[in-house]
Image (tube, rainbow, N blue to C red):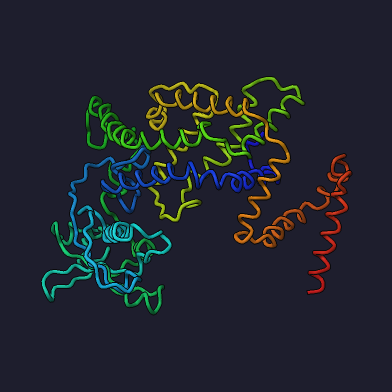
Amino acid sequence: MLRRTESVVEKLLTNWMSVCLFTFLQESAGESFYMLFRAIKHQVDKGPVDVVTGKAKYTLNDNRLLREDVEYRTLTLNVVIPAAATCTGATSQIVPAKVLDCDTITQVKEKLVEQTWKGTSFSQRPHIDSLQLEWRAGVAGHLILSDEDLTSVVQGSWKRLNTLQHYKVPDGATMALVLSKHHLHDSHDYMPGEKTPALDDGEEEGVRLWHLVKAREESELPKHRKGSVRERGGERAKAIPEIYLTRLLFMKGTLQKFVDDLFTAILSTSRPVPLAVKYFFDLLDEQALQHGITDPEIIHIWKTNSLPLRFWINILKNPQFIFDVQTSDHVDAVLSVIAQTFMDSCTIADHKLGRDSPINKLLYARDIPRYKQMVERYYADIRQTIPASDQEMNSSLAEISRNYTADINCLVALHDLYKYINKYYDQIITTLEEDTTAQKMQLGYRLQQIAAAVENKVTDL
């Protein structure tokens, strides 16, 4: 039950939980989640990230692991931010920022904007496409850097994206983020030397872009072929996964505290549990009792499907739902592993791990039993607390409605709901007329009145 989202009730439950737990996110779990998100982004950005394949040196996801040893070093750039770009009217500022010399120009711009506008939400920052990266040396030495230009290295059908290494930018160099002139006129026009929709153009001309690793090379081949590509022995092929596992374990160790803090914030009963969670869990317990279901595993699964699976997993995989932040494939890959770990912790079945088990599960093999205990204790503590009455729940919902009245367009929501009802109108009317509770509340008759009013309005138009 509640495993899918095919019925109206299940979809409504998802939205109902989201609305009811928004305050809990703001006051409790949100801070821990944001700290985890920032820690992931900071750690991933410390190492090379292939902008074409999306693979990174620092990750939890073995499918997104950059398996090649890429030489790189950290550079500290002195970034000049013109007054026009700061949107504050102040004079130009010079801010130090750290990047990698293997970063593409677009990656450099993203990191510079991230560090120089770190006190500004993502939606309020200048868009990357609206900025040019200008290398300044001396009085007259100004050079616009781009991912692709006439200096790009082309070998056969491969074109390599430009990096700071390519331009031989030294540590301590002065860079300026300047507003693109063409962006002020037409954001869809591209000037020579600027980052264009290169993948599309490249495919038409038969040119393939690459950054750190070419897609056809060993790093992109299936694991079972890697030993034969370079004619290596079996012992060497077996040793490679251990090297990769060490990198993954390093990333896991770096994020461990943040993951623990988030799971504790979600599963703690030291502070009052959200009323909606208590009310709905009690409802599930009552339904199990009414239908003679005594297997605790079934009730556990119901609760897992209604809260962790339906709400928390969705939030963990989509931080942009609650934060004004920029997401990326390599950060999403890490969050997916953490979300799967949380989901595994909420299941009752014991996962038997072996040599063929996914590396992502092996990483948290020792932690999942501890997380499982946290989940079981969370469910047990909620069950033992004082039941939430209908009056308390109604008062809480009324308060939520008052708090967010100005933020929600009820007419649009009702119209979307009606479009769904209209699609299955006959079945819904039949069900309402046969249901005893619906008969007492005259829900079928009320729906007919609504349908008549809506259809008449459309006809009048």
Percent across and percent down for residue 144 are 22, 70
Can the viewer see residue 133? yes
The residue at the point 51 percent across, 45 percent down is 25
Q: Position of residue 93 (x, y in %)?
A: 24, 67
Picture quadrant of residue 334: top left
Does 233 sit left or right of 343 as displayed? left
Measuring 22% from the left and 42% from the top, which residue is drawn there? 69
Residue 255, by quadrant, is: top left
Given residues 395 and 54, the one toward you in this image is 395
Write the residue at 80% across / 69% down. Answer: 457
Q: Residue furthest bottom?
A: 185
The tally of labels here is 0
Image spot of residue 448 (x, y percent) = 86, 56
Q: Residue furthest left?
A: 138
In screen coordinates, is 431 left or right of 211? right
Can residue 226 be seen? no
Residue 363 vertical position relative to residue 180 in the rendered view, above or below:
above
Residue drawn at x 55%, y 47% as measured from the top left: 23
Say above or below: 434 vs 399. Answer: above
Q: Is residue 81 above or below residue 140?
A: above
Quadrant of the snapshot with the N terminus: top right
